[in-house]
Image (tube, helix red, strand yellow):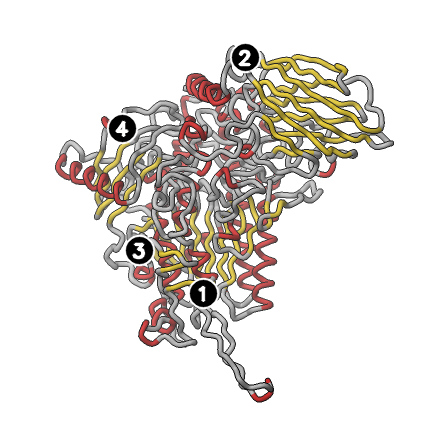
Amino acid sequence: MKKTSAADVQKKTAAPASSKTPDNPDRTVLPIPEPKRPVYKELDARKVKPPPRFEVNAPAGAPNVVIILIDDLGFGATSAFGGPIRTPTLDGLAQNGLRYNNFHTTALCSPTRAALKSGRNHHTVNMGFITEMATSIPGATGQIPNATAPLAEMLRLNGYSTAAFGKWHETAAWETSVSGPFDRWPTRQGFDKFYGFIGGETNQWAPFLFDGVAQVELPEDPNYHFMTDMTDKAVAWIKYQKALTPDKPFFVYFAPGAVHAPHHVPKEWIARWKGKFDQGWDKLREETLARQIKLGVVPAGTKLAQKPQAIKDWDKLSADEKRLFAHQAEVFGAFLDYTDHEIGRMLKAVEATGQLDNTLVFYIAGDNGTSGEGGENGMFNEYTYFNGVREDVPDMLKVLDKWGSPETYPHMAAGWAVAFDAPFGWMKQVASDFGGTRNGMVVSWPRGIKAKNEIRTQFSHVIDVAPTVLEAAGLPEPKVVDGTPQIPMEGVSMVYTFDNAKANDRHVTQYFEMAGNRAMYHDGWFARTIHRAPWEREVRNPLQSDVWELYDTRSDFSLTHDLAVKNPKKLSEMQALFMKEAEKYHVLPLDDRLFERALASAVGRPDLMAGRTSLTLAEGMTGMMENVFLGVKNMSKTITAEIEVPAGGAHGTILAQGGRFGGWALYVKDGRPAYDYNWLGMKRSSIAATQPLAPGKAVIKFDFAYDGGGLGKGGTGTIFVNGQKVAEERIERTQPLMFSADETADVGIDLGTPVVESMGSERKSQFTGSIPKLTIEVYDANIKADARVQDAQKEVNRETR
């Protein structure tokens, strides 16, 4: 049987514009318009021949498409690219397809994801940074334009079924409430089906999930884990879709939260990795490079790039540090092992339909390099980082046996980021180094790619994936989508590389930029500047006086030989080219602010609660993420709840924000009103009345008088019932900047993990009475809220240097 190549499929399915017919419609304008409706004069329907049924079908032979995107995984982690962590699913695809060792991302999650699904540069789609740190400047607003329709919408309007599972992180932060708008949610971005989480990370044991736009109630299952759950949902959807419409191709976007923090893994998977990282990160880098050269994914003679000075040598660490850090890596390795296994289970569902042969699979091993955001020591609770609290090794050793369990929210030390990004020197966020942007990718399409187990070295970028899919499916790039003229795709199809390992590069120019870290690639040359490391709160130099370096990537794979002094002319050319490309793609002006960008008013980003000092709610109002809830940090606050106590007495949550790793809750336990403040899961304060509430109507008021005089300070909490004081206690410390990325504020229940462990969460925490009205107010007589937050950010910067 003759092998069908990608070129054959393209030739068969494409038709010239001049020969458009009902069977070959003009697909450059989407949706494809319906034919003109006939007008009849005949009275009797039995005498009329009906017109052909209008139906949009994908081109004959168009493949199913699966894009798998792992989170926070570097080039040197997977066994398919010489890394120490076994990835049998990725390895199997590579043996039956192609490894790309010169594929690049943007160095950060939201920008990579938006670029991947649009085929345009991340600033073109307004995703200059993560959505929570968007600004008002075009290129960084966090709002994907209608003029850059995503690949999913193009495929859906061309007859594909479409589904997304896992992480999204492309919806503007102020658009994540029940008030919408929902234009930039997955089901309005081309996906018929979405099951996953909207933000940048989630608790894998207790995620905040959506099915479409509806919140998902978590099952009461002690063994629940989101990775398995999302795989189950994908498997069911794939089989169901093919059972009903076997001839209709599908597009699946499968984006686990793994291996982004928190590193949550079932303990049986962790046990498999015991002792595997005892050699430390320096030796691991050497071992990885040797394997990479042997595999051919790195050229012979490649050297390890120098690691950042802030990363200590492994042999200079204490015994306790080595024990802690090695176990952190064991949990990370287990997380990837487990994730790759679940991906394999999803692909087996495709195989079970009999259509794996005509399924184009992209397995992208990372949306950026491995994360170094764990800092020097790692952390048992990632939110300590966001609140400027340092975690010390002795304290983390106390919870070492729990690492990765529901009782932790962990991240690993930054030394492992360098190791898992080998042979490069930097990591996630550093867009000016391949450790931040170069990710291993495998492409498999048995029917369309003749080559097997080969390596492709052509320069490519995440924006090249969408045009590759269109060409493989025999679809033109649309000029108009949903009535909006489109900005042309800026990526280059990689189909030309499928059966030609020696083809000349077609993607020859590409800028990189993330919060001031920036670089320029052109025809093998790479000019760059390291503006700031992920753990640095201050920039190294002003933007105007950054120090640039120059590399020839054709002979220097890992960027170890700086040629800036030897070839200043070429460096000047590259710097000038960067400015030209930066202007063209809306990268300018550069914005190197960090925590300040988290404050909406400082950068002109819309804020749902802007100017608000009170919020009136009622039972049933749940799932309010931190960006769409009233800001209560570093402020005094009052909660007034009008409740109805049932005859048997009341029990449950009245209002809670956050969860196990930081938050607060007003609740009733066994009839007695109480308030708890959970400071980063490290210290808990509790205030409780001694007498139970009487049945009937009652007004519970909680007042917190903030001490002031600084940030994250304490205050006095007082509980009143029907105007009478019933309890008062001190709360010594509060969190200055953040409770959680995925825990929510909820009336009448505590979703996710519990703020108060004895009350539980989800159904266990549901209030047994009713809450017809609840008002939360914040106040401070002296300092405006925005000024307080700005001060908080400055203090965090000082404390974490």
When the figure is inspected, residue 746 is found, relative to residue 553, above or below; the finding is: above
| Mark 4 / mark 1, whichever is N-terminal | 1
Mark nearest the camera among 4 and 2 is: 2
Specify the amino acid type for callout 2: Gly
Circle 2 sits in a helix, a strand or a loop, which is it? Answer: loop
Q: Is residue 444 left or right of residue 523?
A: right
Q: Position of residue 286 (x, y in %)?
A: 36, 36
Q: Does dot 1 land on a helix, a strand or a loop?
A: loop
Q: Earlier in the sequence, mark 2 or mark 3?
A: 3
Tell me the mark number nearer the camera, choosing from 3 and 4: 4
Q: Which is in the foreground here, disc 1 or disc 3?
A: 1
* Residue indicated by mark 1: 158
Which residue is drawn at the image coordinates 59% and 68% (left, top)?
244
Q: Position of residue 255 (x, y in %)?
A: 50, 48
Q: Nearer the viewer, mark 1 or mark 2?
A: 2
In the foreground, 390 or 688: 688
CB atoms of marks 2 and 3 within 8 Å: no
Ranked by sequence position, the earlier of labels 3 and 4 is 3
Residue type marked 1: Asn
Q: Residue at x 58, y 27 (%)?
A: 400
**Quadrant of the drawing holding the N terminus:** bottom left
64 and 265: which is toward the camera: 64
What is the x, y in percent for residue 561? 22, 35
Q: Mark 1 vs mark 2: which is more N-terminal? A: 1
Report the disc number at residue 543. 4
Q: CA distance from mark 1 to mark 3?
A: 21 Å
Q: Residue at x 73, y 33 (%)?
A: 771
Residue 708 numbered mark, or none: 2
